[in-house]
Amino acid sequence: MSAIALRGPARVVLAQHRRPLQLLGALPVLVVVVLAGAWLWTDHVMDAFAATGCSVRHTTPGCGDTVREFLDRRQWMREVLDWSGLLMMVLPAFVGIFVAGPVIGREMESGTYRLALSQSVAPARWLAAKLAVPAVVTLASVSVLSAACAWARDRADGAHQGEEWYERTVYGSMGTVPVGYALCMLALGGLAGLVLRRTVTAMIVTVVGYGALVAAVNSVRDHLWPTLTDTFKQGSGYRFPDGAVGVRTGWLTHSGRRLPDNACLDWASDFKQCLTEKNIDLRFHEYHPASHFWPLQLVETGILLALAALAVAVAFRVLRRRHG
């Protein structure tokens, strides 16, 4: 009997929001088909271009139009990847809006949630179903989308079309971070709908909260994992590591003190004298190499999941205070 009661609220959520949940579940299938089709077509274009004997790097007489057509088609693949990355960045906001508005906010505003609570369904069980069903669909969908984006970008990198791992539409569309953002916004949207009890207001607050969360995390991301530091003499021919993202650059004194990059900006007329007077010996670069992708992803995801757990805990506490 208890097992049936546990499944009851979940069935109600599925019945009430069948179409949006089906759309969220079908979205990864559609994206996978588009990305796979785009890559297969691009791969065919590359093979056809290789068969012409023309080269992008070395100009060959009579190949101008062929090269331009090839580059245009390769650019199309890049645009497909950009759009998929943009989709992954806005998807958490839509998940939060869906939960804040139709799933919880609307029921709180209209009072229909009282019907569920009057059917021997505990308030905590009602809220758990409202959050758990979208969470399961979101977790599966976003995980598949993230894997598909990673696969497509890996293929694009092999064709020298990919962007760097630290660019927002790339970093935010691969790994565990998209899942973390989606689950975090699901929890925050649920809390907003429960507390505000107004559909439109809860949806607006959720969107604003997502923007604030993204801005806050972006501002501290470089500090989520220890950076590497290279020191070198000015004019030594130092080469910045391939695939790395710079965090900070500047000057290093004899005592090991770090000065900003513009420490001698006002000494343009006598740059060497500035270096001497400030006891500057070396330059330094702080950076994250490409190998830091996963540590940064996992730490950021952990923070997002912690925020999601906190939001869920607050939501259950609010519900207990109102309905016991």
Image: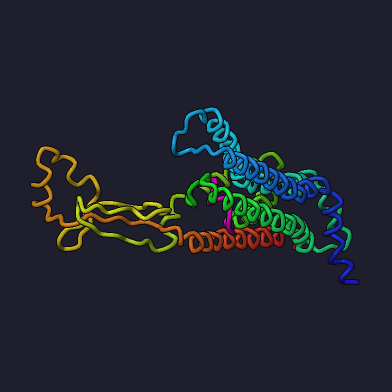
Q: 98 or 293, which is in the foreground? A: 293
| Residue 32 screen position, x and y as percent | 70, 49
Is residue 174 on the magenta stretch?
yes
The residue depicted at 44 percent of the width and 50 percent of the height is 219
Residue range highlighted in magenta: 168-177
Residue 82 visible to an observer of this rendering:
no
Is residue 142 on the magenta stretch?
no
Q: Is residue 22 left or right of residue 292?
A: right
The residue depicted at 9 percent of the width and 52 percent of the height is 276
Q: Quadrant of the N terminus?
A: bottom right
| Residue 233 screen position, x and y as percent | 20, 55
Q: 5 or 266, which is in the foreground? A: 266
Check the image and report above or below for 201 versus 99.
above
The residue depicted at 45 percent of the width and 58 percent of the height is 290
Q: Quadrant of residue 120?
A: bottom right
The residue depicted at 45 percent of the width and 34 percent of the height is 59
| Residue 296 screen position, x and y as percent | 48, 60
| Residue lying at the far right of the rendered structure | 1
Check the image and report above or below for 29 versus 324.
above
| Residue 29 screen position, x and y as percent | 75, 49
